[in-house]
Structure formats: C-alpha cells, structure tokens
Amino acid sequence: MTEPTDGYKEQISQLRSDLNQVVEEKKALVRSHRELVTGIKGKIVEIKQFKERRDRCTNAVKDLKVRRTDLHNAIKEKVSKLHDFRTEIESKDSKPRLPVGMLKAEIRKLEMRIETGAISFEEEKKLMKVIKDKQKQMKGSEKFETSHEDERSLVNEIRLARQESDDVHKALQENAKESQVNHEKILVLSKEIDDQRAKEKEMNDKLDELTKKLDDVNTVLQELLSKYGQARDVEEVHYDEVRQEKKARDRKILDEKERIAEDKLKKGLKLTTQDLLALQGKAMMEEGNHA
C-alpha cells in the first residue's frame, strides 16, 4: 500500500541530493576562484617590480643621454680649440727650434769660456752677443715646447672624453635594452591578467548562479518538508482513527465470543478451545484495565 507521504519522501530525497551536488560544485568553484585571485595578485606584484626596474632604467637612459650630449659638445669644443691652437702655433713660427736643454748647455759652455778663458774684450762682446741670441732662442723654444705640452694635454683630454662618451653610450644601450625587456614583460603579464579577469568574471557569474540555485532548491525543499510534516500529521490522525475503529471491532467480536462462552458455562455445556480463549482474553483485558 502506497502511503500519502511516499511521494514527498522521494522528492525530498532527490532535492537533498541536488542540493548537496550544488553545494559541492560551489565549493570547488570557490576554491578555483580563490586560486585565480591569488594568481592575479601575484602577477600584479610582478608588474610592480618590473615597472620599478623599467622606470629606473628609463631614468638612467635620460641621464646618460644628457651626459653623452654634454661630452659630445665638450669634445667638439676641444677639437675646435685644438685646431685653432695648432693653426696659431704654425702661423707664429714655422722655423725649426733647438731643444731648451741643448740651448742651455751651449749657453753654459759659452759662459764658462768667458769666465775661465783668456779672451779679449772684443771676443767677449761677441760671445755675449751669441749668448743673448741663444737665450732669445731658448725663450722661443720654451714657449714652443710649452705650447706643444698644452697641445698634448688637450689631445689627451679629447681622448679621455671620447672614451667616456663610448662608455656612456654603451651603458645607455644596455639600460635601454633592459628597459624594453621589462616593458615587454609588463605587457605579457598585463594580457594574462586581462584574460584572468575575464575568467574571474565568468566565475563570479557562475557563483551567483549557483547561489541562486541553492536558494531556489532550498526554498522548494523547505516547502516540501513543511507539506511532508503536514501530511504525516494527517496520516497519524488517520492511523489513530483506524486503530480505534479496529480496536472497537475487535472488542465487539470478543464481547460476543465471551457472551457465548459464558452462556454455555451457565447451561453446563462443554466449552471449546475458542470459548476458553475468549474467557481468558476477557480476564486479561480486565487485568489490563485495573493496572
């Protein structure tokens, strides 16, 4: 016999199964969502680090460009100065000049000759004139040699400036390359974050959908549980009425059997097993009532 609550039981069991399935699906999705968000946060930290490196290299490139320009201008100025300096030296005196050291030695030799030699006054005058000429030559040679020393110093300054310019250019290229590498990494990570953001939105939409589904299933389940409870109450009342009716019928039948058995007993007739059971049942029932 099918009970009135059997249909509710099947529906409730199915809804509880559906509810558990949705709960497990939502738990798995929440875990995946948490992992995705953690991954996005990690990439944001990486982008920040790459931006700091890129900006540091970019600023270095700007500073190095300024330094390179300054060096180029300085080199250009020194080269022009060297050209003018050489032109000036060549225009002033193109005659070959004796080294200062050699002229000093010759002057000293002539002075010694005057001091120690037995020479006439006229010869001394001639030697003094020669010494003056050589002293004049020596001054010219000193100026000439000083000019050439300045020239060599200027050439060395140009060489060092060009070397520094090459080093600056090399450092500039290295920083520019590193800046570009970091920028490209930022672009790759940004694209990955955009893709993951889109996936995160899909997950959020799915979570909203599952949450609504949980609410809907739970609402239906609660309604069924309420109906099931009401149906059970109705069943209990019905079963109680049926039990009372059956008890009344059984009592009526037993009373009839007792009456027949007692009537036989009064008449002295032989009692059957059924008569004895009826009398025994009456006695048990009376004991139960007294208890």
Image: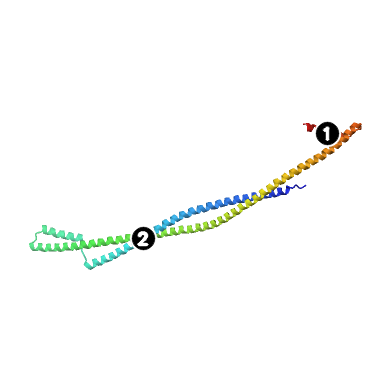
Residue 247 in the image: x percent, y percent? 80, 39
Q: Residue furthest left?
A: 121
Residue 40 in the image: x percent, y percent? 52, 54
What residue is rendered at 82% in x and 39% in y? 250
The amino acid type found where label 1 is placed reads Lys
Drawn side of residue 166 relative to residue 246, left or right: left
Question: Which residue is more in the foreground, 37 or 84?
Answer: 37
Residue 58 appears in the figure: yes
Mark 1: secondary structure? helix
Residue 93 appears in the figure: no
Of tags 1 and 2, the one toward the viewer is 1
Tag 1 residue: 282
What residue is rendered at 46% in x and 58% in y? 183
The amino acid type found where label 2 is placed reads Val
In which quadrant is the C terminus drawn? Answer: top right
Tag 2 residue: 66
